[in-house]
Image (spheres, rainbow, N blue to C red):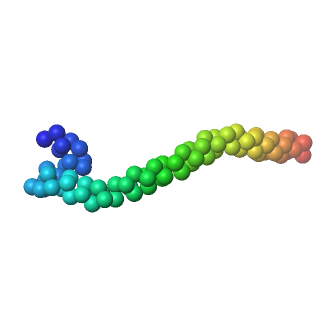
Amino acid sequence: MRCASCRRCASSPSSPSSPSSPSSPSSPSSPSSPSSPPSPPSPPSPPSPLHLFTSSQPRHSPPARFPAPHRQRPSRLPVQTFPDFT
C-alpha cells in the first residue's frame, strides 16, 4: 500500500512478482554496481561546471543591458531630428 505512492513501486504492486521485480533489477546491477557507482558521479561533476556557466550567463546579461540603452539613444536622436526638420 505504501509502495503504491511511489511511482517505482506502483508498477511492482501491479505485478504479482513484486518481490522478484526489485530483486531482478538488483541482481544485474549488483555485478555492475562497482562500475555503475563511478559512472553516476562522473555525470554529476560536469553539471556542476555547467551550473557555473549558468551563473556566468547572468553576469553577461548586465553587459547585454548596455546595448539596450544604446539602441534607445539612437531612436531618440531621430525623434529629435524630426522636430529640427519641421
Q: Is residue 54 left or right of residue 29?
A: right
Which residue shows up at 18% across the image and 43% down it? 3
Can residue 12 be seen in this snapshot? yes
Q: How many marks?
A: 0
Q: Quadrant of the C terminus?
A: top right
**Residue 8 in the image, given as x and y percentages of width and height:** 24, 49
**Residue 82 in the image, given as x and y percentages of width and height:** 85, 45
Which residue shows up at 67% across the image and 40% down it? 59
Asked where in the image residue 83 lies, by quadrant, the reply is top right
Which residue is at the front of the view, 48 or 23? Answer: 23
**Residue 60 in the image, given as x and y percentages of width and height:** 69, 43
Q: Is residue 3 left or right of residue 49?
A: left
Which residue shows up at 84% across the image and 43% down it? 77
Q: Quadrant of the N terminus?
A: top left
**Residue 22 in the image, given as x and y percentages of width and height:** 20, 52
Which residue is at the front of the view, 53 or 62? Answer: 53
Can residue 79 be seen in this snapshot? no
Residue furthest out toward the right: 84
Which residue shows up at 90% across the image and 42% down it? 84
Which residue is at the front of the view, 76 or 22? Answer: 22
Q: Is residue 68 left or right of residue 10?
A: right
Q: Is residue 24 left or right of residue 35?
A: left
